[in-house]
Image: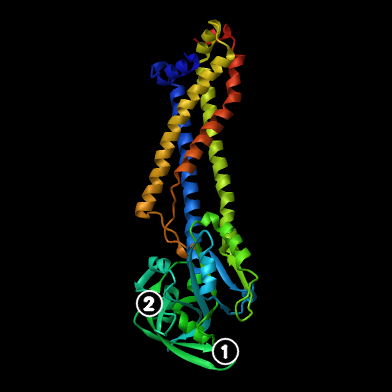
């Protein structure tokens, strides 16, 4: 039989009146561990949810990987490239590629009787996945975009609609200026979307792929580039390496050279900012583990002082210091485990409550989301529990050596 474990269970289950001093200390230690773990769960859930939400928003506008003209990389000019069926077949044949879609950007000006706004018309065709746009549609519907004809339909952002004071069903003129002349097109606003990603909502509206290509004076087989969607985001770099080997530095039929970039390279400022959030997470995790360790250390010292006479009796009966230390470490493990269960309940409960009700709101102009996103990740929660338990017990090893200085004869004075 494990004697230290047996004694620890008896001490932990002792509810007698003799030990009024240690009970508040045990409760404080338990609450300290619970609060620390709950804060860690909430922090990790918020940061993971926020990072993945913002990442998905950026991917919704730019896909995972973009294949384009080499001259377009790190340039503000809009160069065309021929992405025909042969290139699409090569891209789709790469392991990990889920979908390939073409797009064409055209710069223009939206104008009403009272105001005007410079925007980028992103031309997309029927092959384009519009799930992300549907999720963020706030008014109207997603037009049936075409790559063979001009439907005259337009999808605007809420920011654009508010600035120009227009709504779905309204007609609006667009002006396109190049080195040759000024052309005018009239569009019908079919739908309005809102992603709260201001840098995108302010400039991107959607129209037909055919229309955007014609406005750039390109033939139907030329476009700004192709967007590649991968099946597993964690394997993005692997897929990208295959695209580099099979597509980059090759030429289309007109001699234009292909290049590509990931979403990380296209928008480095956003992803660098998201990576900085990890620093905050580590700081909070460290502080919360320190909180749990300090409360448990103070609680253990109080318990040892209260049980000084018991320690003296055990030593008189032949127990070694190591066995007695193990007894109090087992006792501490019971306290920590109870705190962990309580912390799991609080932390997971708040995360689930937020996901169901969205009770915690944020300013979308600052945080790009209207509700605090929380992502419940069970494996990470398990790791947090194990790490908290191990660290808390580890910091208690040194205070437990205080037992070695208790002399059996002198401990009798505590009776």
Counting residues from the start of the chain, the first of labels 1 and 2 encountered is 2
On screen, 291 above or below 239? Answer: above
The answer to which image quadrant residue 138 occupies is bottom left
* In-image side of 13 versus 324 (left or right): left
Q: Position of residue 147 (x, y in %)?
A: 44, 80
SS type, badge 1:
loop
Say left or right for 113 vs 213.
left
- Does residue 100 lie above or below 205 as drawn? above
Residue closest to the far bottom? 181
What is the quadrant of residue 67 in the picture? bottom right
Q: Circle 2: is it few (<14), some (14-19), or many (20+) Cα within 10 Å?
A: some
Q: Residue at x 37, y 54 (%)?
A: 359
Q: Is residue 369 visible?
A: yes
Which residue occupies the foreground of this view, 209 or 391?
Answer: 209
Instruction: Tell me, yes or no, if residue 116 can be seen here.
Output: no
Q: Which residue shows up at 61% across the image and 60% down it?
A: 241
User: In the figure, 258 relative to 400: above or below?
Assistant: below
Q: Residue at x 53, y 40 (%)?
A: 288
Nearer to us: label 1 or label 2: 2
Tag 1 near tag 2, CB within 8 Å = no
Task: Name the element at disc 2.
Answer: loop
Residue 302 drawn at (x, y percent): 52, 22
Question: What residue would you read off at disc 1?
Answer: 178
Q: CA distance from mark 1 to mark 2?
A: 28 Å
Given residues 262 and 351, the one toward you in this image is: 262
**Left or right position of 149 against 55:** left
Q: Give residue 144's mark.
A: 2
> Residue 409's spot in the image, x, y percent?
57, 6
Q: How many marks?
A: 2
Residue 296 is situated, as x and y percent measured from the top left of the image, at 52, 29
């Amino acid at each position: 039989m494990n004697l230290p474990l047996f004694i620890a269970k008896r001490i932990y289950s002792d509810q007698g009146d003799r030990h009024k001093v240690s009970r508040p200390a045990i409760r404080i230690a338990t609450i300290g561990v619970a609060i620390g773990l709950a804060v860690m769960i909430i922090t990790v859930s918020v940061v993971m949810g926020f990072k993945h939400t913002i990442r998905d928003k950026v991917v919704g506008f730019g896909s995972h990987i973009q294949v384009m003209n080499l001259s377009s990389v790190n340039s503000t000019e809009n160069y065309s490239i021929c992405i025909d069926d042969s290139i699409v077949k090569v891209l789709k044949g790469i392991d990990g590629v889920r979908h390939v879609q073409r797009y064409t950007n055209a710069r223009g000006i939206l104008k009403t009787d009272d105001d005007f706004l410079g925007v980028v018309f992103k031309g997309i065709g029927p092959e384009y996945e519009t799930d992300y746009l549907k999720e963020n549609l706030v008014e109207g519907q997603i037009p049936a975009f075409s790559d063979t004809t001009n439907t005259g339909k337009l999808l605007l952002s809420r920011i654009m609609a508010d600035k120009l004071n227009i709504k779905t069903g309204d007609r609006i003129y667009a002006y396109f200026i190049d080195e040759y002349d000024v052309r005018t097109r009239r569009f019908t606003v079919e739908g309005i979307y809102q992603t709260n990603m201001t840098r995108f909502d302010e400039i991107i509206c959607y129209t037909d792929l055919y229309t955007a290509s014609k406005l750039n004076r390109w033939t139907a087989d030329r476009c700004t580039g192709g967007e590649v969607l991968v099946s597993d985001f964690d394997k993005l770099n692997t897929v990208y390496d295959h695209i580099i080997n099979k597509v980059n530095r090759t030429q289309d039929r007109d001699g234009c050279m292909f290049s590509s970039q990931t979403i990380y390279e296209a928008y480095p400022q956003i992803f660098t900012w998201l990576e900085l959030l990890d620093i905050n997470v580590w700081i909070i995790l460290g502080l919360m583990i320190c909180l749990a360790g300090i409360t448990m250390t103070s609680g253990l010292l109080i318990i040892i002082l209260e049980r000084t006479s018991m320690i003296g009796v055990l030593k008189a009966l032949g127990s070694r210091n190591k066995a007695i230390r193990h007894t109090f470490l087992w006792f501490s493990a019971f306290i920590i485990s109870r705190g962990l269960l309580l912390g799991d309940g609080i932390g997971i409960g708040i995360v689930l409550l937020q996901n169901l009700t969205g009770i915690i709101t944020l300013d979308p102009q600052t945080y790009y989301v209207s509700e605090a996103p929380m992502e419940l990740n069970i494996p990470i929660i398990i790791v947090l529990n194990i790490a908290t338990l191990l660290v808390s017990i580890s910091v208690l090893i040194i205070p437990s050596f205080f037992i070695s200085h208790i002399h059996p004869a002198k401990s009798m004075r505590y009776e």
